[in-house]
Image (tube, rainbow, N blue to C red):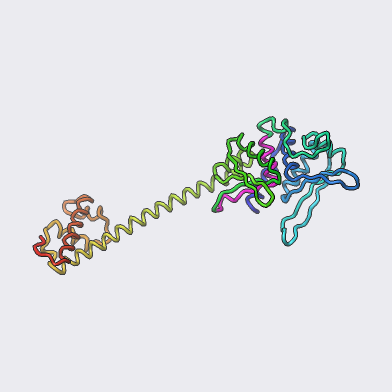
Amino acid sequence: MSFTAKTKNELARKELKKKCCQKAELTAFIHVNGNLQITGGQLELNITTDNPASARRIFLLVKNLFGENSELLVRKGTRLKKLNRYLVKVSREEKVREMLEELGVMSRENQFSRRIFPYILDRKCCRRSYLRGVFLARGSVNSPDSSSTHLEMTTEYEEQARELVKILKYFNIKGKMVSRHNNYRVYLKDGQKIVEFLNVVGAHQALFSYENAKILKDMRNKINRLVNCETANLNKTVNAAMNQLESIKIIAQRTGLQNLPDSLRQAAELRVKYPEATLQELGELFTPPLSKSGVNHRLRKIEKLAGQVSKNKKNLI
């Protein structure tokens, strides 16, 4: 099951005790996925969705608010469209008119309106419910484990999309709008804003999944940075040791290590004996122990002498 489906299933089970919130959510379903048709001279309301949990939600909202037993139909997906489509149909014209007028979707002039009736969003809880309804109707969200974070809600009407942006702004969530394929999409790309949206609509299990994924990603990134840093330091140490050993070899072959001052000869002998040791570890092997910077100074001097030897310079020491 996709993360979108899991999130919608969670939201569809959320209990709504207030009638005002039920109306706001049902209004969102009708605004985004509702349409009117005339069958046998009777006005009918159809609300479609591709999520079975959302379909059950619509069915229950219609029944709880208006006492109407609507029809719940399933249209099997085709080869091209694999998902089933669920249709909630309200067939009685008098009930359709009652619903639409009550929700502000139809005016007394019998005009179907996609605008949000002011009292529907009168309360903060109702704005949450409206956003929840739109997401349940035509929303999607990427899995928190995916490489990119993305949440969007789609509508065919620009005015609705702008209203969604305004409602998001009310909750301090900056949504962006784009027009694609005759649809308007309001989307969020920022992971933190997606978490805030999930909190607003009440998808707390999905929210925890996002937070946990974010923590794991941060931990992995931190570990990768540490590993990369350690690897870089190790490579640097190995390369430095190889250069030092090569310099010691040059001096040993050309002039002999016995001709080096005691301080440099001891450093050279310890490096040859412990080629993989760090500067700090080498310093602890000196008698008396030597600091890391002291060891580095002596080995650099050996490298400098090796460079001079390579150029056949005399009187090196």
**On-image quarter of the N terminus:** bottom right
In this rendered view, identify the residue nearer to me: 260 or 182.
182
Q: How many marks?
A: 0
| Magenta span contains residue 134 | yes
Q: Residue at x 10, y 63 (%)?
A: 259
Horizontal and vertical percent for residue 291? 21, 50
Q: Residue at x 72, y 44 (%)?
A: 32
| Side (left or right) of 155 relative to 171 | right
Give the farthest residue toward the left: 315
Q: Residue at x 21, y 55 (%)?
A: 285
Horizontal and vertical percent for residue 173? 58, 38
Decide: is 156 above or below 130: below
Horizontal and vertical percent for residue 19? 75, 33
In this rendered view, identify the residue nearer to me: 235 or 153.
153
Q: Residue at x 65, y 46 (%)?
A: 185
Give the farthest residue toward the right: 40
| Magenta span contains residue 272 | no
* Span colored in magenta: 127-146
Q: Quadrant of residue 131?
A: top right
**On-image quarter of the C terminus:** bottom left
| Side (left or right) of 303 relative to 210 | left
Horizontal and vertical percent for residue 88? 79, 46
In this rendered view, identify the residue nearer to me: 135 or 109.
109
Q: Quadrant of residue 260?
A: bottom left
- Most frequent secondary structure within the magenta stretch: helix
In this rendered view, identify the residue nearer to me: 152 or 184.
184
